[in-house]
Amino acid sequence: MKILAIDTSNKPLSVAVMDNDNLLAQTTLTTHRKHAEFLMPVIEDLVQKSDLLPTDLDRVVVADGPGSYTGIRMAVTAAKTIASTLGIELVTVSSLLNLALNIQKEDVLINPIFDGRNQNMFTGLYRWNHGSIETVIADQHINLSNWLELINNYDEQIVIIGDTDSFEKDMRTALHSRLVVGDSLDGIPSAAKLGQYGLSQAPIKDVDAVVPRYLRLTKAEADWKKLHPNEDTHDYVEKV
């Protein structure tokens, strides 16, 4: 199966072309935030370097959030467009789970973090179990103090990766020696790992229904809610 994997959920941009578990080509950029200028040229370049045509692709795997609103929206839009145009499968994977794939140890809990500002974070808790990664605490947008209350219930070491700088001090105070800070490279998403994981996941049945997983209100949603405080916002989602 020929797979195109895309993750632009934060500052790094990572794209890979896979043939089942075999990596054919990968590009990861960490120096630019304007992913819109690079994403499609990178995809075209990697497909060409893999000696493939776009029509040779069988599946697109995309990190669908949480993370940067613009980055997630762009990746999901590109993945949906490619899947629909080529008539191929689409798989969505949590951006936090993809980051957690960088830590492949079975005796720790993995805590990927994206900075949500003002001591808030996008985060989740994962562990490996007999070679498979599983969710311990679901992805969410949460204040640091509330998150610490949740993870203090676990005895294992907790490895934090990603945007850790704003949170490490307070987490060290709460968790002491149970806290392990991952290497900086562990905080960079790998499209190759994303594609490898997505190989075993079931494809989305309705590609058109896929939307980014923001995990909190966008500015437009928040502004709308202020103007309509008594109305249900459950179905207020941004279509892409």
Image: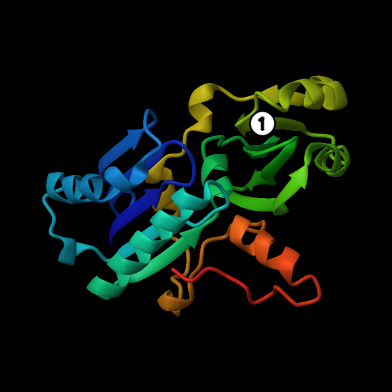
For the N terminus, which image quadrant? bottom left
> Which is more toward the observer, 113 or 115?
115
Report how many numbered discs are placed on residues in the image: 1
The residue lying at 47 percent from left, 33 percent from top is: 188
Amino acid type, residue under disc 1 in the picture = Ile
The residue lying at 28 percent from left, 44 percent from top is: 37
Residue 90 sits in quarter: bottom left
* Badge 1 density bin: few <14, some 14–19, many ≥20, Cα 10 Å: many
- Residue 106: x %, y % from top left: 64, 38
For the C terminus, which image quadrant? bottom left
Q: Which residue is mark 1?
A: 160
Left or right, 69 with respect to 158, comes to left
Up the image or down, 15 lies above or below 87; here it is: above
Q: Tag 1's secondary structure? A: strand
- Residue 14: x %, y % from top left: 37, 41
- Residue 149: x %, y % from top left: 88, 41
